[in-house]
Amino acid sequence: MARDPAQMKTGELRKQAERAGIRNTDQMTKTDMINALGGSTNRNQGGGQRQKDPAPRGVSPTDYKNLPGNQT
């Protein structure tokens, strides 16, 4: 499995970029090299908020507390 480019050292990333055929890596920043390789600097971060799935009917205690046979 490939390592996350944002976690790699700049020298390792530079070697990888040169192997990929990217020129002028000595004049690029780490972020520029990651973007040139087709990656994103914040690939594993974020995610945002997700919408909760609605609960199915009949699972609320108010729905099943008065069912026959369920009287405790």
Image (spheres, helix red, strand yellow):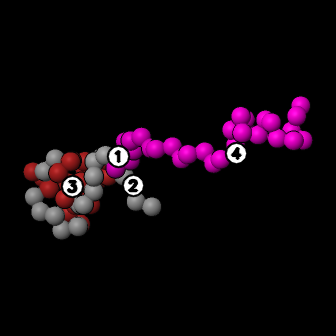
Residue 13 in the figure: left or right of residue 52: left
Q: Secondary structure at mark 2?
A: loop
* C-alpha separation, residue under disc 1 versus residue under disc 4: 47 Å
Residue 42: x and y in percent read 31, 46
Percent of width and height locating residue 35:
21, 55
Estimate the spatial distance between the alpha carbons at disc 2 and disc 3, rounded to whole Å.
15 Å
Check residue 53 for magenta coloring: yes
- Amino acid of disc 1: Gln
Q: Report how far apart the C-alphas of labels 2 and 1 lie in the structure.
A: 7 Å
Q: Nearer the viewer, mark 4 or mark 3?
A: 4
Is residue 13 among the parts visible in the rendering? no
Q: Is the residue under label 1 in contact with that under label 2 (CB below 8 Å)? A: yes
Q: Looking at the picture, which amino acid does disc 4 mark?
A: Gly
Of the residues under marks 2 and 4, which one precedes in the sequence?
2
Q: Which kind of residue does numbered mark 3 sit on?
A: Asn
**Proximity of marks 4 and 3: CB atoms separated by less than 8 Å:** no
Q: Relative to 51, say whether 14 is above or below.
A: below
Instruction: Assess whether mark 4 and mark 2 are in contact (beta carbons under 8 angstroms).
Output: no
Q: Which residue is mark 4?
A: 58
Q: Which residue is mark 2?
A: 3
Q: Which residue is mark 1?
A: 7
Q: Is residue 10 visible?
A: yes
Q: Is residue 19 above or below residue 5?
A: below
